[in-house]
Image (cartoon, rainbow, N blue to C red):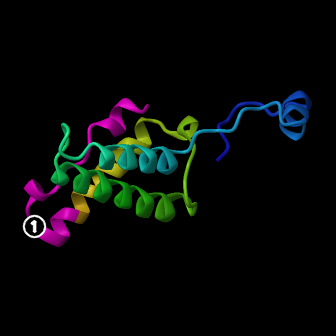
Amino acid sequence: MYSGKPITSEKVMDYVLGKIAPRVKLLEEFQKHNEQMKELLGKGYARGTLQRFTITKNHLASFIKFKFKKDDIEFADLNLEFVKDFEFGSVASVRVKYKNLSNLKVSPPIYRMI
């Protein structure tokens, strides 16, 4: 996704020469988090918490595919609009499926990631 920042010949050369560090992606990091949490089940984390994080990751994956036509996005591309669109889409989806907002548990870490 284009960030709106100017693309210079220096940036292109840095990219080609591998001088630019790999960009961290949202779903990759979310998966790492869930795997770490899985190892800590019973040591401060409950199975239900892991299930809610897994559900949230799956909703994020669907949202990213729908909105951006990509499998994942970089943290650098996250902004408040992304969070609001995801939250609105999640609430709308839950209303249609369950007609009960108490079933929606969007994880607070998505807000801390930005």
Q: Which residue is mark 1?
A: 99
Q: Amino acid at mark 1?
A: Lys
- Residue 86 in view of the camera: yes
Left or right? Give the position of 59 relative to 103.
right
Q: From the viewer's perspective, is residue 19 above or below residue 84? A: above
Left or right? Give the position of 75 relative to 34.
right
Q: From the viewer's perspective, is residue 85 above or below residue 3? A: below
Left or right? Give the position of 31 relative to 99.
right
Q: Quadrant of the C terminus?
A: top left
Residue at screen point 31% across, 56% down: 54
Residue at screen point 12% across, 69% down: 98
Q: Quadrant of residue 36?
A: top left
Q: Give the magenta part as a residue range.
A: 94-114
Residue at screen point 35% across, 60% down: 59
- Residue 89 in view of the camera: no
Q: Nearer the viewer, residue 24 or 82?
A: 24
Q: Nearer the viewer, residue 52 or 98?
A: 52
* 45 in magenta: no
**Label 1 neighbour load within 10 Å: few <14, some 14-19, many 20+:** few
How far across and how far down the image is residue 91, in percent?
Answer: 22, 56
Residue at screen point 27% across, 42% down: 40
How far across and how far down the image is residue 25, in percent?
Answer: 55, 44
Left or right? Give the position of 52 relative to 2.
left
How far across and how far down the image is residue 39, in percent?
Answer: 32, 46
